[in-house]
Amino acid sequence: MTAALLVALSGCGGHEEKREYAIPSSFCGIPVDQDELAPFMPSGRKLTIKKDVPDSLSSVCQVRVDSRLAVEFKQMWLTSSSTAYFVGGQADSRLDREAEGGRFLYSGWEAFGRTRECRHEKLPGGTIFTAIQMQSPDHQDADAMRKLIAAYTTAVENTDICKDGKNFTGD
């Protein structure tokens, strides 16, 4: 919340858009560091969050600001050990950095990761992959994206879905 206030108060003089909404500490049940995320979030009045489970093996948390898509947080069960394989299924990703031997792939505005602790009970070799995709590259910070995806992936590892090895639909 402090970061939201600082952004809203910065820039005296002239007409500057500001953020009038508070950034939550979690999105669709997964904790996210507000201070790390704040610089990426656009100005606007109202933030809405919608969780979508398009199938039993994936979950998407869409964050909109004034009805514009601002960021998507994704989780997907896959039978691969490669984050690059997961990224290959995403639209138009341009990643130029990696961490932990390719476990995390990221750029200044999007990041992808692979959990270590998640094993699906009915999907041999299945693990959860994660993604954070900002919908505007206006603000870029590769170091912040690396920190965000690492923390988000760890938080996903602490969910019941991961611990119980279940589908996102609960079956």
Image (spheres, grey):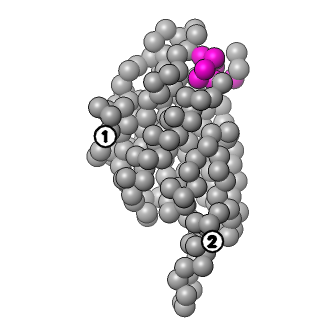
Can residue 162 be found in the magenta stretch?
Answer: yes
54 lies left or right of 139: right
Residues packed near mark 2 inside 10 Å, few (<14), some (14 to 19) or many (20 plus): some
Mark 2 and mark 1 lie on one chain; the one further toward the N terminus is 2
The residue positioned 69% from the left and 44% from the top of the image is 50
x and y percent of residue 154 in the render?
A: 51, 34
Using the image as rendered, state which of residue 66 and residue 2 is in the foreground: 2
| Residue situated furthest bottom in the rendering | 13
**Above/below status of 142 relative to 115:** below
Q: Does the magenta segment cover residue 59?
A: no
Residue 120, by quadrant, is: top right
Numbered disc 2: secondary structure: helix
* Residue 167 visible in the snapshot: yes
The one of 171 and 34 positioned closer to us in this rendering: 34
Counting the numbered discs, the total is 2
Q: Magenta span covers which residues?
A: 161-169
User: From what the image shows, is residue 66 above or below residue 119?
Assistant: below
140 displayed left or right of 25: left
Residue nearest the viewer, comparing 156 with 44: 156
Disc sitting over residue 5 in the figure: 2
Q: Mark on residue 98?
A: 1
Q: Residues within 10 Å of mark 1 (few under 14, many from 20)?
A: some
Instruction: Please give the name of the residue rendered at 60% of the width and 20% of the height, measured from the top-left corner.
Output: 163
Residue 122, percent from left and from top: 58, 8
Q: Report x, y in % for residue 21.
A: 68, 65
**In terms of secondary structure, where does tag 1 sit?**
strand
| Residue 102 position by quadrant | top left
Question: Is 59 positioned to the left or the right of 125 in the image?
Answer: right
Disc 1 marks a residue whose amino acid type is Glu
**Residue at 65%, 63% in the rendered image:** 1
Position in image of residue 164 (x %, y %) = 63, 17
Mark toward the viewer: 2 or 1:
2
